[in-house]
Amino acid sequence: MKTLLSATILFLFITTHVIAQQRRTDDALLLEYYQNQHFADALIYLKGIYQEPVTDAKELSRLAYTSSKAGKLPDAEGYYQRIFEKDSTNLVVLYNIAGINQQRGNNAKAETYYKKIIAIDSSDFNVYKQLAQIAHEKGDIKSMMSQVYYLQKANSLNPTDADVAAELSSLYIQLKQFPKADKTLRVAIAADPENVFLQQSLLKLNYAENKWRETVKIGEQLLLLGDSSVFTMVQLGRGYYETKNYPCGIATLLTIPELYQTETTAYYTAVCYKMLNDQKKAIFYLKKAIILSISPNAATYYNEIADSYTTLKQLKNALEAYQKGLLYDDKPITYYLMAIMYDTELKDKKTALKYFKKYIAAKPDEKQKTYIDYSTARIFALNGH
């Protein structure tokens, strides 16, 4: 890396040999700054040598490069802009302005300059990749089609680039253009058969096409390559189920850490057990699938609905909402709120007492001490003491 940096700097020095004698830089000192990553010091040094207004393109280029490396991106762009104003076809300058804006999140401006590059040179592979990335970040249907176009251009220039092939095939899969996805991947995989990302893309394609034997084959190849990612294990586990290899399906799906278990993984684990006639475990995992399919915030949402109904004085609807919330999570606070409603709004002391007791029995957090104390007092009062 150090050798590459030195070569870059030496080239920069050679191209600036025409600087006037009275403004000549100490090349050895500047090289030392660069090699030691002291770009801020290098920038201060250069600004002391190059007095404003700087007009020489090579001096501006050196200031721009150093500003960029020092993290002063607005300054770097400003220097490159001065060069651009003198030569709007300078590809290096265009690329740097585009890259700086992309780093700063100014994608619209970056896109403008990348397009200026391909208007001059339509064979720039990296520019098409960057334009595809910008289109991806927009996230709408129109931009998705632009992303496909730019990736197609990049892929045509370098069909063995793994990143482009994987991204393009993924988009083809979303668009149900399976033959195009397959062709794109086959070419790239032929050049790099042990590329995990390409093999994962091929796994995704066969999974999408319900080609289960191929899914299993590719999944097992990925295991041999050391890939035990959640993505691969889920798809391989489903593949084992669909090819009736239920023990392997269970073994594969159960290797997925609990944190990454989902409704899908629980369901296919359950049906594998079901096909092996282990109904108890099938029931266990089907119940788990139900739990995982429900938002953990469902009870909170129902409590909020109940609160809104209470504000509207629609007490029956409020109670129904509280009851539904309890089906998802028997939060102590729900019992308390129901007790308060029965006690103060509906004047149903018997039912209020029941829910105050349920609240205390649910062992609410000590942070709810005020509610706990009040509930204890109301239980005492409602019991007739």
Image: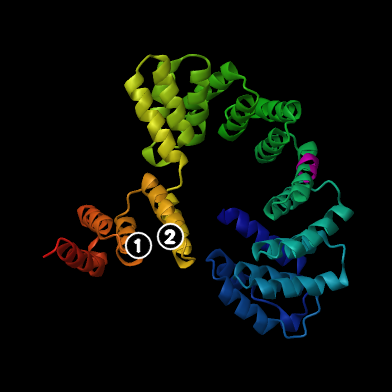
Q: Is residue 248 magenta?
A: no
Say if 300 sits above or below 184 in the image.
Answer: below
Number of marks present in the image shown: 2
Which of these two is toward me, 308 or 103?
A: 308
The colouring scheme, among rainbow, by chain, secondary structure or one colour, is rainbow
- Residue at image position (55%, 19%) is 217
Which of these two is toward me, 82 or 259?
A: 259
Instruction: Give the image quarter of residue 340.
Output: bottom left
Residue at the disc numbered 1 = 346
Residue 248: where, in percent of width, then height? 42, 19
- Residue at image position (61%, 58%) is 5
Q: What stretch of residues is rendered in magenta? A: 149-153
Residue 131: where, in percent of width, then height? 75, 52
Horizontal side of residue 320 vs 53, given as left or right:
left
Q: Look at label 1 and name its amino acid.
A: Leu
Residue 125: where, in percent of width, then height? 77, 46
Q: Look at label 2 and name its amino acid.
A: Leu
Distance from the alpha carbon under mark 2 to that under mark 1: 8 Å
Residue at the disc numbered 2 = 315
